[in-house]
Image (cartoon, helix red, strand yellow):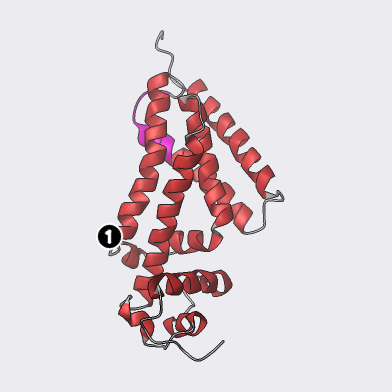
Amino acid sequence: MTGAQPYHHLNLRKTLLDAAVALIGEVGPRAFTLREVARRAGVSHNAPYRHFAGKDELLAAVAAEGFDRLTESMEAALAGGQSPRERLELCGCGYVDFALRFPNHLLAMFDLPQELREHCRQERELGGSAFAVLLNCILAAQASGDLPAGNPMPLAWTAWSLVHGIAKLSGSGNLPLDPQATLAFTRSAAAGLFSGMNAQAPDPER
């Protein structure tokens, strides 16, 4: 690596984000430093402050980028569904596919300290947008009769817990499946979960 570049380095913000993502994969989202991010980006140690007030703000930006990509991944996956039930299953596959492709972003997204998360408006908004994709799929499946009527939130939380659990198990190496098999397992697990949800719906004839 050559000497540090001036702060007006082309697309510095994106360069810093990419360096932070790579570093998070090595040391986790809490242990990295702005100085090390700057070193890896090939800029002066003061350059990051042109875009980020501190390490927490950079970490929040990585998380926001992750939630943006997560939303795109779920929307792209569910677009291929032919029914509300199929779109819901594919939405879960999109979640896990994102986690497989961007594991370092996932770490930043769900390991932010609570006090930092509460002050990160963009991260909260993008996280809400990602959850809204899932919630809309739940609502459509309720409308079609594929899921029981009533409060959709417990159903959405249950579905989210399933795919997030698969994502974390896969990311930690505790799920002995390759990416393709992981997505196939996600689809079958989601199908089983939603069938069980519908089977437990109260009988309107009783």
Q: Is residue 112 something one can see in this rendering?
A: no
> Percent position (x, y) of residue 94?
52, 43
> Percent position (x, y) of residue 200?
49, 23
> Percent position (x, y) of residue 164?
52, 48
> Percent position (x, y) of residue 112?
41, 65
What residue occupies the far bottom of the structure in this picture?
Answer: 3
In the picture shown, does residue 165 fall above or below 62? above
Look at the image and tell me in which quarter the N terminus lies.
bottom right
In the picture shown, does residue 205 fall above or below 166? above
Q: Dividing the picture into quarters, in which one does residue 101 lie?
A: bottom right
Look at the image and tell me in which quarter the C terminus lies.
top left
Residue range of the region highlighted in magenta in the rendering: 148-156
**Which amino acid lies under the numbered mark 1 shown in the image of this protein?**
Arg
Name which residue lies at 50% across and 91% down: 3
In the picture shown, does residue 90 fall above or below 26? above
The residue tagged 1 is 121
In the picture shown, does residue 115 fall above or below 139? below
Name which residue lies at 47% across and 39% down: 158
Name which residue lies at 27% across and 60% down: 121
Name which residue lies at 56% across and 35% down: 190
Q: Is residue 149 something one can see in this rendering?
A: yes
Label 1: how many Cα within 10 Å (few below 14, some 14–19, many 20+) = few
Q: Does 104 appear in magenta? A: no
Q: Between 56 and 5, which is closer to the camera in this rendering? A: 5
